[in-house]
Image (tube, grey):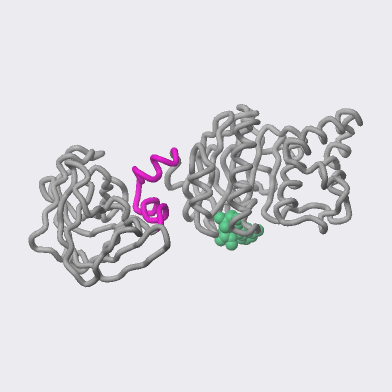
Amino acid sequence: MANLKINDINKNFGSTEVLKGINLDINDGDFLVLLGPSGCGKSTLLNTIAGLETSNSGEILIDNHVVNNMEPSDRDIALVFQSYALYPAMTVRKNVTFGLEQRKTPKEKISEALNEVSNLLQINELLDRKPSQLSGGQRQRVAMGRALVRHPKVFLFDEPLSNLDAKLRVEMRREIKKLHKRLKTTIVYVTHDQTEAMSLGTNIAIMDQGKIQQCDTPKNIYNKPQNMFVADFIGSPSMNLLEGSLNNKMFKPNGSDNVQIPLEKYDFINKNINNGSIFLGIRPEHVYFDKVNEDCFGIKLKSEIIEYTGHEQIITFNFSGQQFLGKFPSTIDIQMDKELDLYIDLKQISLFDKNTQNRI
Ligand code: ADP
Ligand code: MG
């Protein structure tokens, strides 16, 4: 087990900057999820930590030792890929123990380690099979076994569940969580799946275009997004972002002449901020048909579209020309093309500056 520190890492492929000043502090036993859209640089960052790629500048420290110039095999890191990368000609047993044999580990030690890992991952019955005789989930388990058997200081996962079908993905997700609870290993886990990120991580680093946009607990990422990218990226459907103007702690949405939303209870980062063009963010699940608390702001909006998803329904309203979504239990009846009384919970809003796109 170890801590991992990433100091101002930059990485170019030719003239393309792929990592732009990445800083991360990962404590012993943390489960950090790197979450971001495809192509934002997640795998490049993971490969740089593992030593498969070299950075152009910056430092990587494991347990306070700089490892930039260390070979991947000397870093005491295990990497599990999406593609499993098992040796097809070897049995499961051999796949798991091969690395230890290469390192001339004593026979009893190897057999002990194999025992421990196959019990932990429940692959005892599979030891004599070849990878081609395994299901996707079993292959993924073997790939994790091969990584675990070395007791690495840090575990790196690169989208390990992407090749599995939806049901198995949820099961394996739970198993990885269990494994972390039990072993308390430091983990950096890459995914583009926000549910996977929210449910697995002790911390989530949201990445976009080679930069960390926010690194925080899942709850803070969800409730206090630091900028509009994070606000929009997390949550399904996304947070409503109403464009308008701020004036003396009142919000006037664009296109509406008579709506003024009071913001005096909002926790502004800059207490002196007074006016300007802003976005008011509110999640569709924080819009209600009842006044659920004292901080609710009442408004009449016309319902336009209904999307039924089984346990929920998503309604599109017209907010003075701006699209505005609400998410409700599917058990209630909602009329379409009608002006309806709604309540927005002002305790749950986020405000963003239109120019900087940052939380204010
Ligand atoms: P992610 O894992 O977030 O999908 P990657 O780290 O794989 O993103 O890629 C980040 C960017 O770097 C992409 O634009 C990709 O095309 C580019 N890239 C990745 N590897 C190489 C490489 N070996 N040579 C050139 N460009 C690369
Ligand atoms: Mg990738």
Residue 13 shows in this picture: no
Image: magenta residue range: 217-236
- Between 68 and 29, the one lying in front of the other is 29
Rendered residue at 24%/68% (across/down): 335
| Quadrant for the N terminus in the image | top right
Rendered residue at 72%/44% (across/down): 144
Q: Is residue 317 left or right of residue 192?
A: left
Ligand 1 image-quadrant field: bottom right
Q: Quadrant of residue 107?
A: top right
Q: Return the x and y of residue 245 as percentages of the image width and height.
A: 16, 55
| Quadrant for the C terminus in the image | top left
Q: Return the x and y of residue 280 as percentages of the image width and height.
A: 24, 53
Q: Return the x and y of residue 174 as percentages of the image width and height.
A: 59, 43
Rendered residue at 16%/45% (across/down): 263
Q: Residue lying at the far left in this picture: please name it.
A: 258
Q: How many marks?
A: 0
- Between 327 and 263, the one lying in front of the other is 327
Q: Is residue 70 left or right of residue 189?
A: right
32 to 276, vertically: above or below: above
- Between 30 and 164, the one lying in front of the other is 164
Rendered residue at 48%/45% (across/down): 198
Q: Return the x and y of residue 182 as percentages of the image width and height.
A: 64, 31
Q: Quadrant of residue 179?
A: top right
Q: Quadrant of residue 237?
A: bottom left
